[in-house]
Image: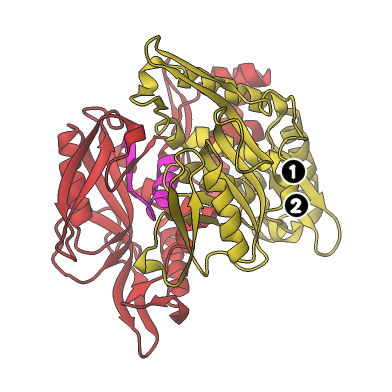
Chain colours: A yellow, B red
Amino acid sequence: MVAIAYRLFHEPHKLFSLGLFADALGAAKSTVSEDVAALRQVCEMLELGRIETLAGAAGGVRYAPFCTAAQIRGLAEDLAGRLRDPSRILPGGFLYTTDLLSVPTLVGRLGDAFATFFADRRPDVVLSMEVKGIPLALMTARAFNVPLVTIRRGGRVTEGSSVTVNYVSGSSRTVQSMTLPLRAVPPGARALFVDDFLKGGGTARGVYDLMRECQAEVVGVGVLIEATHPRDKLVDGYVSVLTFEGVDENQGTVRIGPSPWALGQTLGAAGR
Amino acid sequence: MVAIAYRLFHEPHKLFSLGLFADALGAAKSTVSEDVAALRQVCEMLELGRIETLAGAAGGVRYAPFCTAAQIRGLAEDLAGRLRDPSRILPGGFLYTTDLLSVPTLVGRLGDAFATFFADRRPDVVLSMEVKGIPLALMTARAFNVPLVTIRRGGRVTEGSSVTVNYVSGSSRTVQSMTLPLRAVPPGARALFVDDFLKGGGTARGVYDLMRECQAEVVGVGVLIEATHPRDKLVDGYVSVLTFEGVDENQGTVRIGPSPWALGQTLGAAGR
């Protein structure tokens, strides 16, 4: 049972046939089947994610990371609490978040949270924008067991032919460009864009344009932190974990808290 | 037992007290102790990693990802096989590797392999250089359950005070600079540098200089691919998974294979 759990936990969303486990473990298929049923119960009871069984010849068992509404709320509150530390205030009203975005267990849980919310979008790839968004996007890709594709600011010679789009940064109103190797996203792919921060939404808007050039589809946008200003974003239908209202450099206060989604107020509705 | 396995697998190298499991599961400590013993046997038998028990008041149980020599060799051979695909050859003798560096299960296994080799170095942080090396370094950080710290090419205003060093790229002989937020690496930290590619070793040499400025120590360097040319590197004592001899653009051949370390020829000796 532990061996089955190990394989399922380490390759989420991959469908394993019961026969494969039976062969690998030298056990009867009926024993494997019982183990899977017991595993499903344990995961349900302890809220560790979902074990799904598909019947039929092409069937099997797979593990889907799943966060409950309470787990997502707890994660958001924990993060908001840590980000309120006044020593995180940087000149210019910025917030130091890099360290939290690089703690594997933390971004791992956030990736599970996004995988929970976007489960029915069935993405083929997870897109990230260099640099700070990469760990979070990789862990979301891990939860879906799909490849990560990183969009670059400017092209790189070592990645072959590429497609580039220009976009207007929603906050600074400057024109920038983003590039992707042509072979990175196949036509028809379903792409989930995950980033650390959304202010005006210009980057996300650029990702929509870039995917159109690749003949691919953006099936969702998930960000860790959403700034409340500007109020009008260049995209809608995204989901955020935290809402950032700004900092008061004199008072040393950071106004950040769980987003309506993380508070469960729009769970299952936001971003649709 | 599954609940214990879930927690241990998801937070490698973290020490859990048996009492914590007993409380969380409403089980007797002796039951937990038996479960842990059974778990250790299963992991050993099926080569899934190591369950370590520490006795005493400050003791407990922890999980250390572990790859056998055969697993590392298999991983390297699989990767080399995929990289030999002629369609990966890019103009200028480069090789397209970005896609493989972004498959979560693959970089996850590579991270486990580095965690196996560098286990006794006990790093406090894993360092990566933006951009392509980040997924591999994050998964190595995950296997050690320590934070990832990403070194940037050039500074970024949103990360506060920073330390910058110049370095000479070993292959192109151009002077470049690398930057780190001052607060990212505390003095005295033990840092493991993980990157996707090592050619002349200039980047790795720069990382040594950068850590010296942070009063931190580089305890190891692990790279996925090492180029055989130039033969003289600016660093020694690193470990690589694959050895890249170059491509023949006319013949369409890629000369790449498992490194001596991956072949087990220097296991436990290389990089010391």
Q: Residue at x 21, y 28 (%)?
A: B188
- Determine which quarter of the picture holds residue B225: bottom left
Q: Are marks 1 and 2 on the same chain?
A: yes
Q: Which mark is residue A61?
A: 2
Is residue A86 positioned above or below B228 on the image?
A: above
Foreground pick, A96 / B208: A96
Q: Residue at x 20, y 72 (%)?
A: B229
Q: Which residue is mark 1?
A: A51
Q: Is residue A65 left or right of residue A32?
A: left
Q: Position of residue B185 (x, y in %)?
A: 28, 32
User: Disc 1 is attached to a residue of which chain?
Assistant: A
Q: Is residue B168 left or right of residue B242?
A: left
In the image, what residue type sits under mark 1?
A: Ile
Q: Position of residue B142 (x, y in %)?
A: 45, 40
Provide the secondary structure element on which disc 2 rests: strand
The disc, 1 or 2, on the residue closer to the chain's N-terminal end is 1
Is B136 one of the magenta-colored residues? Answer: yes
Is residue B251 positioned above or below A266 on the image?
A: below
User: Disc 2 is attached to a residue of which chain?
Assistant: A
Marks 1/2: CA–CA distance: 7 Å
Label 2 neighbour load within 10 Å: few <14, some 14-19, many 20+: some
Residue most extreme to the bottom: B251
Is residue B14 positioned above or below B227 on the image?
A: above
Is residue B124 positioned above or below A214 on the image?
A: above
Q: Residue at x 47, y 72 (%)?
A: B82
